[in-house]
Image (tube, grey):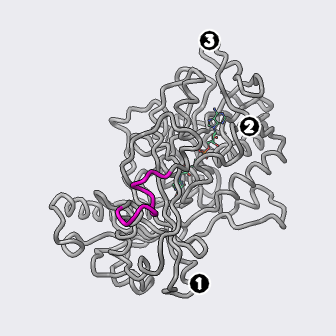
Amino acid sequence: MASSTGERVVVIGGGATGALVAVRLAERGFTVSVIEKAAVGNGSSSRSNAGIRAQFGVEETITGMMYSEWWYERFHDILKTPAEQRQPVIQQNGYLFLYEDPAQAAPAWKPALRASAAQAWQRALGYAETQRRIGLPVEVLEPGDVTRRWPHIEPSRLIGATFCPTDGFLYPHVIYGEGMRRARELGVEVLTQTEMLGARLRGGRITSIETTQGEIVADWFVNATNAWAPRVSAHLGGLPLAISPVKRYLYHLRIQRPIMSAEDWERQPMTIYGLGAGRGALSRPDGPLLVLAWAHETPPEPEFTDADQDRIDPPFNHENGLENFGYATLAEVEAFAPQLANAGGLVATTSGFYGATPDANPLIGFDSHQANLLHAAGFSGHGLMHAPITALLVEALLAGDVTQGSVQLPAPFEQHSIDLAAFAPDRDFGSSAHEAMVL
Ligand SMILES: Cc1cc2nc3c(=O)[nH]c(=O)nc-3n(C[C@H](O)[C@H](O)[C@H](O)COP(=O)(O)OP(=O)(O)OC[C@H]3O[C@@H](n4cnc5c(N)ncnc54)[C@H](O)[C@@H]3O)c2cc1C
């Protein structure tokens, strides 16, 4: 494994992952180039809902996200951002997961839906215990507590809620913009409008890659292209990656009738309106807007184009009458927070691609076909929050800081380590730990 400085690494992909990976590797003494086929932020990083939370179910993810939250709190100090350029990068309003009382919420529900809602609450209580044991300050709330803190939420259909105040949301353009600034400052060559087209291979290794700007020779190659990663891996002679590019939509509601003070508006948590089968609509404030989303079934689009990222299919377009997914999402919110949902109207639909894996955990690790290729992709809708821990794991893998398959985190998390098997790119998805807290 590499430990000497000066070895050359090419990071393919100029999003949040590529930026933070480049910074860490350059700090560690690697000679780094980032290649991005369009402009920095061309992919999902600029189309995201940008939530960050440590309320997950898989222990590796809980630990990793606690580290990421801690890291984003110190973002500008770590990246040595000049004082006059410091903009907010994280807003810790918390994540509030609301759980329904199957008996109260919808008496007309089929038994399977009720069972799923009941199971979601039981699972949440178990997760809260695990999260607290690991050190996350998560609270379990009674319906009355929820309404006292957030009066716009109706208690009647709730069985309870969990809230973690260190969760919140991120400002993606600051992550990749400032990340690339710091990378350049550390000597990283950031090549935009430079697309990876193919590779020269010898003896189970990549010797160089072919790009639209010519050949690049390096010792290591990092695939940080998320939804594009299976295509990129195929061009590099790498593994077939279990990542499906799936469309995901966001709805933007403009408030016409204020229902709370400006300060309370700004402090609203990312709120998830019910979990279990078919549930999981969410909202969060974004300046004067409320952003809404809800999981939906859309077929994978393995050959999507850059333009497809912003293509709004008719059933998902809020301008397409009331019979579309945007208004269905709004109705979900209305069931829990009628005042909020009725305070304004939908004004925009936006979209991008998730790089979804079968167990909703990313692929971070070496390729088993090409020994000097490392994947950091398949974030399943969580890549911005993962970026700091991803960068740490990529550095550990390339620099050889892995002991018996685990990476020990730095202070103040030195009592935690991450078992890389949870993220192995060729893991058996039939038996891997599935992340159930997916939104
Ligand atoms: C609607 C939506 C909501 C989301 N909500 C959240 C959320 O709440 N929280 C969260 O953490 N995450 C969320 N995500 C996911 C998150 O945005 C992504 O996981 C994250 O941005 C991935 O970053 P990345 O740098 O790995 O990939 P990307 O930002 O997609 O960057 C990959 C880059 O690779 C480049 N590239 C591709 N092929 C090549 C090539 N051959 N040569 C050179 N360059 C290439 C692309 O141009 C692109 O710029 C959401 C995503 C969407 C779409």
Query: Where 184 sits versus 127, above or below?
Result: above
Q: Which residue is painted at 52% across and 82% down in the image?
A: 256
Query: Hey, what amino acid is under mark 1?
Result: Glu
Helix, strand, or loop for circle 2?
Answer: loop
Residue 355, numbered circle: none
Could you give the CA–CA distance between mark 2 and mark 3, rounded to whole angstroms? 30 Å
Q: Earlier in the sequence, mark 2 or mark 1?
A: 2
Q: Nearer the viewer, mark 2 or mark 3?
A: 2
Q: Nearer the viewer, mark 3 or mark 1?
A: 1
Q: Depth check: 343 or 262 in front?
A: 343
Residue 12: % across, % down: 66, 35
| Quadrant containing the N terminus in the rendered view | top right
Report the side of 371 relative to 95 (left or right): right
- For disc 2, the neighbor class at 10 Å (few under 14, some 14 to 19, many from 20) is some
| Quadrant containing the C terminus in the rendered view | bottom left
Q: Is residue 118 magenta?
A: no
The reply to whether residue 94 is visible in this rendering is no
Q: Earlier in the sequence, mark 3 or mark 1?
A: 3
Question: Which segment is the magenta one?
Answer: 312-323
Q: Pointers 2 and 3 in contact (CB under 8 A)?
A: no
Residue 146: % across, % down: 39, 80
Query: Where 146 sits versus 195, above or below?
Result: below
- For disc 1, the neighbor class at 10 Å (few under 14, some 14 to 19, many from 20) is few
Q: Residue furthest top?
A: 203
Query: Hey, what amino acid is under mark 3?
Result: Gly
Could you give the CA–CA distance between mark 3 and mark 1, rounded to whole angstroms? 61 Å
Disc 1 designates what residue?
263
Disc 3 designates what residue?
203
Disc 2 designates what residue?
193
Q: Depth check: 137 or 391 in front?
A: 391
Report the side of 361 relative to 322 (left or right): right
Q: Nearer the viewer, mark 2 or mark 1?
A: 2
